[in-house]
Amino acid sequence: MAVSEEDVRHVAALARLGLSQPQVTSLVGELNGILEHMEVLQQVDIAAASLHRDVTHGLRMREDVPNPIALHRAREDFAPSMRDGFFLVPRVSTHGAADSADDEGEG
Amino acid sequence: MSANMSNTLASSSKSRSVTDGYEMVIGLEVHCQLKTRTKLFSGSSAQFGDAPNANTDAVCLGLPGALPVLNRHAITLATRAALGLGCTVHEVSVFARKHYFYPDLPKGYQISQFDRPLATGGNVVIGTNADGSTKAIGITRVHVEEDAGKSVHDRFAGFSAIDLNRAGTPLIEIVSEPDIRSASEAGLYLRELKQIIEYTDVSDASMEEGSLRVDVNISARLVGQVELGTRTEIKNLNSFSGVERSIELEFARQCGVLRAGGVIEQRTMLWDGHKGEVRPARAKEGSHDYRYFPDPDLPPLVLSPEWIEAQRSGLTELPAARRTRFVTQYGLSNHDVEQLTSTVSLADRFEAVTTASGNAKRAANWMLGVVLAAVKLQGGDVTSHAVSVERLGALIKLEESGAVSNTAAKQIFAILENEDAEPGVIAEREGLLQVCDDSALVAWINEVLAELPEEAARFLGGEKKLQGVLVGAVMKKSKGSADPKKVNQLLGTRLG
Amino acid sequence: MSDESLLSRSVADVAADIASGRLSREAALDASMQAFAARNAGPAGLNAVLYTDADGARDALASMSFDASNAAGVHSASATGAMPLAGIPVAIKDNIATLSMPTSCGSKILHGYVSPFEATVIARLRAAGAVIPMKTNMDEFAMGSSTENSAYGVTKHPLDHTRVPGGSSGGSAAVVAAGVTRIALGSETGGSVRQPAAFCGIVGVKPTYGRVSRHGLVAFASSLDQVGVFGQTVDDAALGLQVIAGADALDSTSVDVPVSDYRAARNSEGAQPLAGVVIGRPVEYFPDSLDSRMRTLLDRSADHLRALGAEIRDVSLPHTSLAIPVYYIVAPAEASSNLARFDGVRYGLRVEGDGLRGMYEATRSQGFGPEVTRRILLGTYVLSAGYYDAYYKRAMAVRQLIAADFAKVFASGVHVLLTPTTPTTAFVAGSKKDPYEMYMSDIFTATANLAGVPAMSQPIGRIDGLPVGGQLLASHFDEAMMFRVAYSLERALGAEAHT
């Protein structure tokens, strides 16, 4: 399962990482070098492994009582861009869709 | 974009023939906002309408180091809804991360459930088939997930403004099987679903307010064809009628494409309620790769069978069961039962009034007539209406005994809305008790016969149809206090 | 006036003296700040410390009440008193949220970011009387084994400035090894406390997964991450863990198991303090390729343990060799997800680009360094459609086999395992160019994270003047047994541990 340059570009797009051509070239080699060592896993007999997670310590829940984690600094102190209480981002170009994920198609 | 995709269909009037020979296959995805005080994974308030980002803490903002902690009440509500929809609630379910980048999704992933949802395999009965069997729509799954925030695009030039108050509020997603075959079936399914959600008190379930959201998956195929056609998804729907209308338009569009030998492109369509159009979303449906995997911050959710059973036995009587019972127990018409069971509060009030009055039919008439009209006029809920169950019961009894006429009873009801007193006492005080005393009635009759000699002569000559006029005149003279039955009786004797 | 000799006394003793008023409440802090300057631990020297806040620590001390009622939240089962860390300065790794100093995770993307909330471990340290005067350097987002991957420069090994202190918690290890503080917090994902502890010749503990709250620990790989403790001695580390251990309502993966007394065995004298204790030596951790001098040091330790009454037994953990391949699928996969939140929208670095998409890509490509970029890509790849089953799902299955190896050995009556912590001593900075070669530094440590068991490293001798770590591993939540063996070994080795 060798990683191609196209794979690296696809994955970089999914991860929103802008890569230069030299970076892509170098990463193809590095990822293949790493993944080569993972191939050993394909030979392992995993029949004995249960694919479901251990449920001995099931999920602890909290009561439906307002108890936010207090913020000791104003949002304006750490936000890169805020106005009137909103976080600002460059305008989303395709915003007709109700499903936010549709912006995935952009670019 | 293919040429046929850019067309919008504003009318289906000429498309009736286009759809001939095709059937639609529809599955619905419904999101309901759960009625909790706090968010699904944080103690931030889930209240709406506050200043932007006021209800966000470290978890909602996705701050580095913040971790999710599950809201128990959200799981209780989701379980209740799932049981109300006839689903099997699983003892072990798993939260998973669904990844995509969008500014109103703070962590870069949504915590949802993927391959091990809370509940699976339910159904919703929407009516009866021609052969008498029930028509049910299968429920594939019910899962719990967190909502995203809101992006406001028109507030600041050149920027989108992000408000994360809604981010992290709890939702259930209810996915139906592709069992729906018409727009009206979709409407029936949604109305029944909404009623179940309301009965189980899980969500406000208002499409207009966004607490119930519907996405439509729709494809067309030739009648008799087994394999499914390529589906499109309709989003941005904000009313049940919009759902029905958009389905008709999209079905017609797909049929038109297929009939012309075209191919349906799998993509997202948007409903425009103002223009009454379905049009393709501008962004092309990319090959989403959400990279789901079990959320390592959240161990599997484990619910004991005892707990699940306790939720089941705590469920309120569901709408379908209640309707059936109302028909058999009270002998009411289907039409009246539909209306009486439209909300839990109305159905509960009706049953209480029935108990108080001892007469289900009269109680039904009062509830659906006078009471609902009064509630509508005042606003608010039937539960908080000023005329108590006890007073209304007593009033109905008074009416049934003949002590007051229906007209008088309505007058008494109007008084009761402002004054809490015994209906009988009011009737007496206001002179609304019916006069049954023969001598008083005979005196009124004699007066009327004298005042209306022409009608009197014709009536006494055998024109029975004039009896009504004379009774009306007597009633008027008595200011409504005469017992019309008795008046009729006495007039009848004059005919010999 | 500060007295640096305080730093040669155990934390427990100094804290007791401060709590009782025999020492001034600033005594330990002053000693540490003086040592910080003398050892040149800041950016111009070792570059072990990124941020200091001596004034804030002093203010905290001034307003502190060494009163039992203040100790709420400390899950201390030992007789350490109400304020077991009274006046003790603790250095904190830069990926643990603090209010008074930045939490930048050694990354440019969080440059200058000061968390608006603090980690549970910090709250517990403060409740126990500790102060937080410095944040330490680390590999960016804890991805690395040498502290060469920090956006804020390489941390130097205190004993040999040409070498690395290990990583990713290299700054915390160097601070303790250099004698600036006696205790420091680090974090572990695959060995990031034990490996630098071994390289630097100090004690480093990774508790059971779920033993310590992760609330406020910036996530690298959530199913593997645990806050860990560095100590100059076993007792320092045990005391530090005692204070921070315990379930936390803010971390769903923390586990509500009672915290035992980790220091119970600190004074157990007697000839055979380890009678009845079975110590396993997993053969897979002693390959033929292991440096013979390292083998000799481990044999020496085993001999001591045997002399103290322990039974030494050879055991097998057959899936050990698969740990690195599994680890380097699971950890990057979770990291790719955990690091998606760094998008320039709500906090941290923002670099404008072409529209929203351009802003995302510019921010993330300029904000993350090469190793983080590599792991995000690797992790995204193994989770992506078509590869999930072959990589992530399979790796999680093999992970269970690795965990089952441990369960089987512990079920067979073995109490503690003894292994080398690392295959080599501290290496020369810049010497590991191939990513996978660097990853192999974790070969003996990543197993404990994958299985969730507690493990620790303590100094057991030196090779060419460089420290060697011996690793002890125990079964889930049996830190007390691990410490019991560690105390005995430390006492038996005495000065040999550092020669």
Image (cartoon, helix red, strand yellow):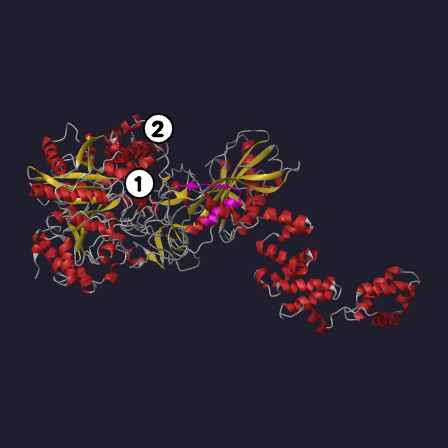
- Identify the disc placed on residue C334: 1
Front residue of this view, candidates B481 and B331? B331
Which residue is located at x 24 percent, y 57 percent?
C99
The stretch in magenta equals B76-94
Placement of C312 over or under B165, stated as above or below = above
In the visual, does C275 lie left or right of C213? Answer: left
In the rendering, at what x and y percent does residue C122 appear?
Answer: 24, 54
x, y percentage for residue B14? Answer: 62, 39
Bin the neighbour count of mark 1 within 10 Å (Cα to Cα): few under 14, some 14-19, many 20 and up: many
Amino acid on which the number 2 mark rests in the picture? Ala
Q: Nearer the viewer, residue A58 or B99?
A: A58
Residue B77 within the segment the image draws in magenta? yes
Percent coordinates x, y for residue A40 in the rendering: 27, 27
Q: Give residue C422's position: percent from left, percent from top.
A: 16, 36
Left or right: B419 with respect to C301? right
Chain under callout 1: C
Marks 1/2 in contact by CB < 8 Å: the verdict is no
Is B347 positioned to the left or the right of B271 in the image?
right
Near-viewer residue (B154 or C61): C61
| Residue at the image position 63 percent from the left and 59 percent from the top | B372
Q: Is residue C164 visible?
A: no
The circle drawn on residue A47 is 2
